[in-house]
Image (spheres, rainbow, N blue to C red):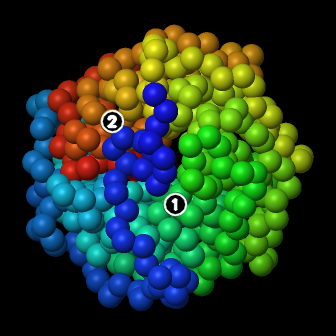
Amino acid sequence: MNPAPHPNPVPGRPARPGRAPASAVDAPAPAPPSRRGLLGGLLAGAALAAAPALATPALAAPAHAAPRSAAPRATRPLLLGTYTSEAGGGTGIGTAVYDTGTGAITTGPAITGVENPSYLALHPSGSTVYAVAEQDAGAVTAVALAPDGTYELLGTRPTGGSGPTHLSVHPSGDWLLSANYTSGSVAVHPIAADGSLGERTDLVTHSSPPPGPGQGGPHAHQVVTSPDGGHVLAVDLGTDTVYTYALDESAGTLTEVSRAALAPGSGPRHLAFHPGGRFAYLACELDDTMVVCGYDPATGALTPGPGQSTGTGSGTSYPAQPVVTGDGAYVYLANRGHNSLTRYAVEDDGAALRLLDTVPVGGDWPRQLALSPDSSLLFAANQRSSTVTVFAVGPDGSLTGTGEPFPAPVAVCVLPLP
């Protein structure tokens, strides 16, 4: 059965608030008031549950805890994206810490004052996190994370589009890139020395080719920089196209240099690069395939191969996001309809994927995946079950659940910090 028309083509995509007038989208959004909140040593890796709450906690009490041990285990911070406007959603960006050995998660208070932070990205310095505001009047917010465990909202800027669902920081640390899903555009914002955002320097709308079958228009779903830093790639689900841009790092403007056409109606959603930088793995949401793409760093050209099976059987499983282990040996894919994780072995120096198996994700509608910095743990944000599930990654790439699902209201993004 074909998916329903956009703006809600996929079951589980939240309804958008009423559309704001064009002037409301383009006008500068008022910066939220600066505030500071104690995160109980979040960036120092201390247990947040013991810290005084600065707001209503965004997460329920942890469902599992680390086993008793004579020696203390290392913990690292974890941030969680959610929808604040949805029933049962969070109150802001969720904070937590995870045990690097067991994967056990302990909740902390929320970073409030951030609307619908459905996707998060960390600055290369580690001192600032950025969040989309997924709503009609799309926006991006900067939040400073200090070493002493405090945070400060550094302000919000409009993206110039609606429904931003993804953002990333250019490797230089000087530019924030965001993808407006509903309006099918990509925005660029300058990043100041303190991590705050300046006025938008560019907005590129995907006006061609025409939308794919059943699509009402372009739907930019992801924007990332190639591993060499030479090009910016935008994945558009609505036009079945991946656009490659050159970023002028002085002016903050994008110039299209190439585009890759995917199968009509395939619905490309997210890609992940192999560490070698010559191949990328693209999840196609609507035709339930994974596509290996060649990448030419010199020209920015992306060359898609044929669609490959996700191992989920008949029907559409709405694959959401691939991730690649740090050594480039394995690729994992979240399948929402199938509620599973697909495991692929990487072969031919990144040029090929071999399907190994699928593993139940232990939740409902896995929206996003993330690996710990050392690729020893895999985190899955399960939107419909409001949980995060954690898996230990074996030497052979196998996935083993580490415990009971961790409660996280409308979990749509999980970001383990280094």
Q: Quadrant of residue 12?
A: top left
- Three-letter amino acid code at the position of disc 1: Thr
Query: Where 319 sits versus 204, above or below?
Result: above
Q: Position of residue 27 (x, y in %)?
A: 52, 88
**Helix, strand or loop status at disc 2:** loop
Q: Is residue 343 visible?
A: no
Q: Residue at x 18, y 43 (%)?
A: 407
Compared to 193, does 268 lie above or below? Answer: above
Relative side of 241 to 63, left or right: right
Q: Is residue 67 left or right of residue 44?
A: left
Label 2: how many Cα within 10 Å (few below 14, some 14–19, many 20+): many
What is the x, y in percent for residue 50?
11, 58
Mark nearer the viewer, 2 or 1: 1
Which residue is rendered at x = 84% and y = 43% of the image?
Answer: 301
Q: Which mark is residue 311?
A: none
In three-dimensional space, the C-alpha distance between marks 2 and 1, rounded to whole angstroms, equals 21 Å
Which percent across, then down, holds residue 379? 36, 36
Residue at 68% in and 79% down: 201
The residue nearer to you, when weighing 314 against 290, is 314
Quick one: SS at disc 1? loop
Q: Residue at x 35, y 78 (%)?
A: 152
Which one is nearer the viewer's eye here, 378 or 40?
378
Q: Position of residue 66 (x, y in %)?
A: 17, 34
Q: Residues within 10 Å of mark 1 (few under 14, many from 20)?
A: many
Which disc number belongs to residue 182? 1
407 to the left or right of 353: left
Residue assigned mark 2: 365
**N-terminal label among 2 and 1:** 1
The reply to whether residue 246 is visible in this rendering is: yes
